[in-house]
Image: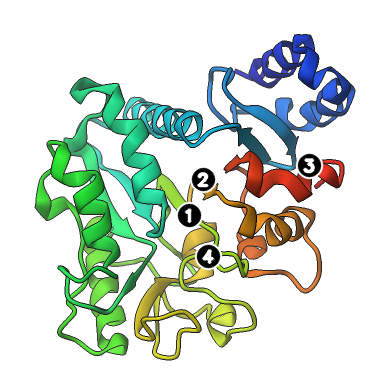
Amino acid sequence: ETNVPYLQIYRHFLNEQTRNQGWQLITTAIEVGSSSRAPFSSEPNTMATVLAAAGGVRVNSFATAAELSASLGATVAEIATQSAKSKPENAPFTVAISGGSLPKLLAAGILKLGDSAIDWNRWRVFFVDERVVPLDHADSNFLGCNEKLFDHVNIDPSHIFKIDPSLPPSECATAYETHLRTVFGENITAANPPKFDLMLLGMGPDGHTASLFPEHPLLEVDDVLVASITNSPKPPPGRITLTLPVINAADRIVFVCTGAGKAPNLAKVLHKEEPLLPAARVSGSNIEWFVDSDAAAEFAAGGNKM
């Protein structure tokens, strides 16, 4: 498995469009390829241009939303399959999903794979963040994920963990921690957070991820698993969100970012410019970005260095 990144680089090196990036990618691949386990997809992604790969982070750029969706769906299916192979029989596959445009892009890729591509019985779905609104409200992340994806696959509704919107945000956050403990056990704490198999994140134009906004006090919260917010800079104001200790503990982290409006701050996030934007504070040894060419424009123009 440690040879996989080299195969990725070799194929891109042969591509005339990426030949000039070849030596840089080969150099950064040494660090990626030396890992004891393959950090990314086990097969090279022929639709993606790998803009950068270093330090456990890979940035894949796609010319079209359709290509991004197809690759994202295939990657998520592969992660779920590999998780099943590495765990005891019937052990759950735990995933946390963000809202925004991510559910639509994810669904477009996954649904094309067919019913047999994913064992939905294993899935236990949480939401990275949620707006404290009725579950049938247009702002509900649950509703967006359900309508785009889960209504169209054979998943047990009880395996999708929803908020109780009748509660105020602080109580809603506490109740959501109870859901986490039903799957991950009673011993999880912020100091010993649950380890999700997959964390699916988006990034806003301001660099926020989950409901963690620039310069907001929630960025410093490290003593709870789920935090509440009543003054969100982006409406609606009442929300709950997984905290950074939980997000950063995930085994695999996948970001999805599209649109020219996100290009300036995506470059800042990937370059780790100070002060760090919320998305730049997500850390781990296995982070993969799926971005379109519009979002990647300023990062690519800056030399693709992380």
The colour scheme of the drawn protein is rainbow
Residue on which disc 4 sits = 209
Marks 3 and 1, how far apart in space?
A: 21 Å
Local SS, label 1: strand
**Three-letter amino acid code of the residue under disc 4:** Thr
Discs 1, 2 touching: Cβ within 8 Å: yes
Whether residue 165 is visible here, answered yes or no, is yes
Mark whose residue sits in front, 3 or 1? 3
- The residue sitting at 16% across, 39% down in the picture is 152
Which percent across, then down, holds residue 235? 40, 81
- Residue at horizontal 10 percent and vertical 45 percent from the top: 156
Q: Which comes before the other along the chain, label 4 or label 3? A: 4
Q: Along the line of sight, which residue is nearer the eye, 303 or 221? A: 303
| Crowd class of label 4 (few under 14; some 14 to 19; many from 20; radius 10 Å) | many
Q: Secondary structure at mark 3?
A: helix
Q: Are marks 1 and 4 in contact (CB under 8 Å)?
A: yes
Q: Nearer the viewer, residue 109 or 196?
A: 109
Q: Which residue is mark 1?
A: 201
Mark 2 or mark 3: name the one nearer the start of the chain: 2
Image position of 253 (left or right of 125): right
Q: Which residue is mark 2?
A: 254
Amino acid under disc 3: Ala
Mark 3 or mark 1: whose residue is earlier in sequence: 1
User: Which residue is at a point 49% across and 28% down the rendered structure image?
Assistant: 67
Q: Nearer the viewer, residue 223 or 127?
A: 127
Secondary structure of residue under mark 2: strand
User: What kind of residue is marked 1?
Assistant: Leu
Q: Which residue is mark 3?
A: 300
- The alpha-carbon separation of the residues under discs 2 and 4 comes to 12 Å
Sequence order check, earlier mark of 2 and 4: 4
Q: Are the residues tagged 4 and 3 within 8 Å (C-beta)?
A: no
In three-dimensional space, the C-alpha distance between marks 1 and 4, rounded to whole angstroms, equals 7 Å
